[in-house]
Image: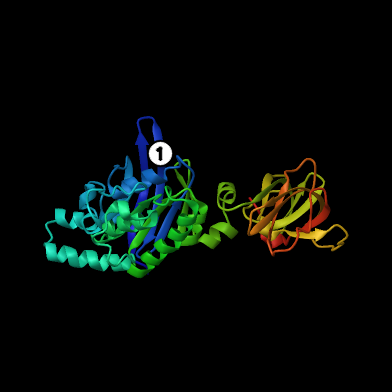
Amino acid sequence: MSEIDVKLEHVTKTFEKFTAVKDVSLEIQKGEFFSILGPSGCGKTTTLRMISGFEVPTQGSIYVGGERVNDLAPHKRKTNLVFQHLALFPMMNVEENIGFGLQMQKVPKAEISKRVEAILEVVELQGFQQKRISQLSGGQKQRVAIARCLVLNPTVLLLDEPLGALDLKLREQMKIELKKIQHRIGTTFIYITHDQGEALVMSNRIAVMNAGRLIQVGKPQELYDAPNDKFVADFVGDHNGIPVIVRERQGNLTISQAQELTITSAAGKSFAVGDGCHVYIRPEKIELLNANDMSFLKNTYPGVITDVIFEGALIKYMISISEALPRLTVSAPNIGQELPYAVGTNVRISWNPENALTL
């Protein structure tokens, strides 16, 4: 059985008349890269601050390394927190920044130098001890901030949207770097983000929060391919949502009506005949066919392209299959050829019933 590094039991946090976190229970395993994902104001940062000790739960219990920490001050917990704006000391060099916490703990100077050198190797900044903070790139500053926390050997490293201030290209690079660092040292990382791409790339598991509540916890592919809630389907990745009325159940499949269209999809939840719900289908799961392709597959419909969006690696086609329904997005890889379909082109679209989900 996996060892649990962080455990939340029915944790609630109320500020005056506003409840930011509502009855959250969660277990985070030792050595996990665990992300808490959600929109602004969902309660994810408040949850992190309660784990770190900067906020106290109104109700419930928090355990770190098996110890109940509700009443422990932040500096007495086995956690360290990396802030979005890093809070590096500009008047100190890299070694002094990283060793500051050790110095406060009265660790001998020789031991500080040794541990700083070792952690700089982990974050791939060997030989940077004497560099000034002003001499570092954004990504290097990020790694110094992480090293400053890791050198204290925390049980858990907490990261509050640390890539938010970086430009897009550097952010993409740092996703890989952070995952490599975490894998190299094996420390449990709890990562807060509103960016689904960050969470999907780096995490072993992800918790999705909304309006203070925990909606779903799972591996990245589980959340992407099998969301258990309409909010998760909408928030994690791009999705087409088609409003439908349930007409029939056939084993694990649901037969639904969307205006004049009949749609067959996997049953994500238990619905009764006549219930209103949505069928969700990922843009990359929809096949784009020529208008004269008369394949008699389930979920094959005529449509017209209303817009073409070029995104570099991907081309997105906006397609209308009914005036009364939302346009569907179909994504296709850019293979370097002339765009095969233009605005106004009549086409057919098709998808496998198992690739669509009723929620």
Please name the colour scheme applied to the rendered image.
rainbow
Give whichever of 169, 289 is nearer the camera: 169
**Tally of marks:** 1
Could you tell me residue 77's position as x and y percent? 24, 53
Front position in the image: 218 or 82: 82
Confirm whether residue 308 shows in the render.
yes
Q: Which residue is mark 1?
A: 20
Amino acid type at circle 1 is Ala
Check the image and name the residue furthest to the front: 135
343 to the left or right of 151? right
In the image, taking residue 252 as reference, residue 34 lies left or right, namely: left
Q: Nearer the viewer, residue 212 or 147?
A: 147
Mark 1, Cα crowd under 10 Å, few <14 / some 14-19 / many 20+, is: some
Residue 304 is situated, as x and y percent measured from the top left of the image, at 81, 49
| Residue 263, percent from left and from top | 76, 53
Name the quarter where the N terminus is drawn.
bottom left
Q: Would residue 156 be found to the left or right of residue 245 on screen?
A: left
Residue at 57% x, 55% y: name it: 227
Residue 129 vs 229, above or below: the answer is below
Circle 1 sits in a helix, a strand or a loop, which is it?
Answer: strand
Q: In the image, residue 172 lies at what x, y percent?
A: 48, 58
The residue shown at (18%, 64%) is 113
Residue 81 seen: no
Asked which quadrant contains residue 123, the reply is: bottom left
279 horizontally vs 224: left or right: right
Identify the residue at horizontal 43%, vertical 55% (top origin): 35
